[in-house]
Amino acid sequence: MYGAPVDLSFKNICSAWTEEPSRGLRPLKRNSEMKYSSCSLRLNNNNILDLHDLQKTVSYFLAEPSQLAWLDLSFNSISHIDKVLCELRELRVLYLHGNSIFILSEVDRLGALPHLHSITLHGNVIETNKAYRNRGISALPQLKTMDFSAVTQQERVMAELWHQSNSRIRSNKLLKS
């Protein structure tokens, strides 16, 4: 049903995302509207700063934009996990590694994606936070892999304990103020 990924990697894209996709080993299939029959989009290794035009890009290239399941935004200059990602309800795999994301709590937004089972965030500033992996696993309990590593049952337990402890600390701070 779905063809090869639409590959817009290494195109030096900043914001005008209307480039012609690279040709891979598998040919890209188009429908009568000249949109691609794919549920995968590669936008890695570009100069993307933000995602405000992402929906427009997905709609421009994909025949069924609501079915986007695999999105590679790695190695860009993205500094925030934009809420627009939460509109991609069928997203299962999201690569964000090698960017400039620096607010760990923004990972929580991705909890709105019910099918997300694989994410990469390593190589971002947030990785230096000691709660990085616990926060990610806690915010995204359906994850199977994070940063190309399987999420173990022990990590899930530790993330839950971390979450409970952190929730108690925040509650106590609110009560004291």
Image (cartoon, helix red, strand yellow):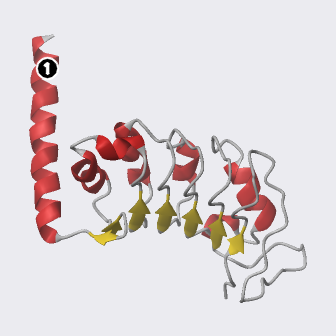
Q: What is the three-letter code of the residue carrying label 1?
A: Lys
> Which residue extends farthest top?
177
Circle 1 crowding by C-alpha within 10 Å: few under 14, some 14–19, many from 20: few
Question: x, y percentage for residue 28?
Answer: 78, 83
Above or below residue 4? Residue 118 is above
- Is residue 134 shown left or right of residue 41? left
Residue under label 1:
173
Residue 144 visible in the current orientation: no
Above or below residue 59? Residue 69 is below
Question: x, y percentage for residue 126?
Answer: 36, 42
Question: x, y percentage for residue 127?
Answer: 33, 47
Dividing the picture into quarters, in which one does residue 22 lie?
bottom right
Q: Nearer the viewer, residue 29 or 49?
A: 49
Above or below residue 3? Residue 66 is above
Above or below residue 122? Residue 117 is below
Q: Residue at x 45, y 58 (%)?
A: 113
Q: Residue at x 13, y 20 (%)?
A: 173
- Is residue 158 shown left or right of residue 28? left
